[in-house]
Image (spheres, helix red, strand yellow):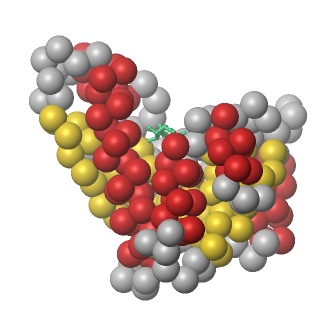
Amino acid sequence: MKIGILISGRGSNMVALVDAVKSGEILDSEVAVVISDKANAAGLEKAKDRGVEIVVVGRNRRSREEHDAEIIAELKKREVELVCLAGYMRLLSPGFVQAFPNRIVNIHPSLLPKYPGLEVHERVLAAGETVSGCTVHFVDEGLDSGAIILQREVPVNVDDTVESLSARVLEQEHGAYVEAVKRIVSGRL
Ligand code: GAR
């Protein structure tokens, strides 16, 4: 299965997926391209170091639809069959979602449907939650609202900060994302 990964920043989830494909943990697949909407995304260098083709598609004051159309074209050109959002910080247009029906997945740092959107860990801490975690889900036209593939939980400690909680969740994200993609590639989903 040809995989395309979209990032906006650090790219640690992208690295987890690329390394799992390269090591054979995720079978019968190839990461065909890593696309970033930000030219300065730190993840771009990490993808390049791993021999994966990188493409920057900047927003450049275009509409969401025009921007997405260019990304779709880059993905289709490489015959990408599965799109993984990995810290890609823009909402997709309906046209993007329809271009890859049931073949776009995202990782989100909360136990959805709780805490969709941004500043997740801040809100989890402010609400006094004792458990948080991450969710891998299919992307639909809503905000973090598509069908859930899997979740992993972590405890929230009384002395947690945004940094300590996000690091604990991130550790679980990497394994969760690899497991979810394995299920999709092997046809179990
Ligand atoms: C991850 O925690 C991911 O769950 C989150 O951004 C971080 C990206 O880290 N995604 C979202 O909040 C999506 N709305 P990474 O660039 O190191 O993978």
Is residue 121 shown above or below 104? above
Q: Position of residue 174 (x, y in %)?
A: 40, 51
Left or right: where does residue 136 sit relative to residue 94? left
x 13%, y 17%: residue? 158
Q: Quadrant of the C terminus?
A: bottom left
* Image location (x, y in percent) of residue 69: 81, 56
Q: What is the x, y in percent for residue 120?
A: 37, 29
Please tell me in which quadrant of the rendered image residue 169 appears.
Answer: top left
Taking 157 as reference, is 183 left or right?
right
Q: Is residue 96 in sight in this rendering?
A: no
Which of these two is toward me, 149 or 34?
34
Q: Which is nearer the eye, 146 or 175?
A: 175
Q: Does 189 sit left or right of 96 as displayed?
A: left
Residue drawn 15% across the image and 35% down it: 155
Please identify the quadrant where the N terminus is shown: bottom right
Q: Residue at x 35, y 56 (%)?
A: 176
Q: Quadrant of residue 45?
A: top right
Identify the residue at horizontal 35%, vertical 31% (top origin): 167
Say if residue 152 shows up in the picture. Answer: yes
Find residue 60 and report its horizontal and vertical position in percent. 87, 34
Q: Nearer the viewer, residue 182 or 138?
A: 182
* Position of 140 relative to 157 (above/below): below
Foreground: 14 or 119? 14
Number of marks drawn: 0
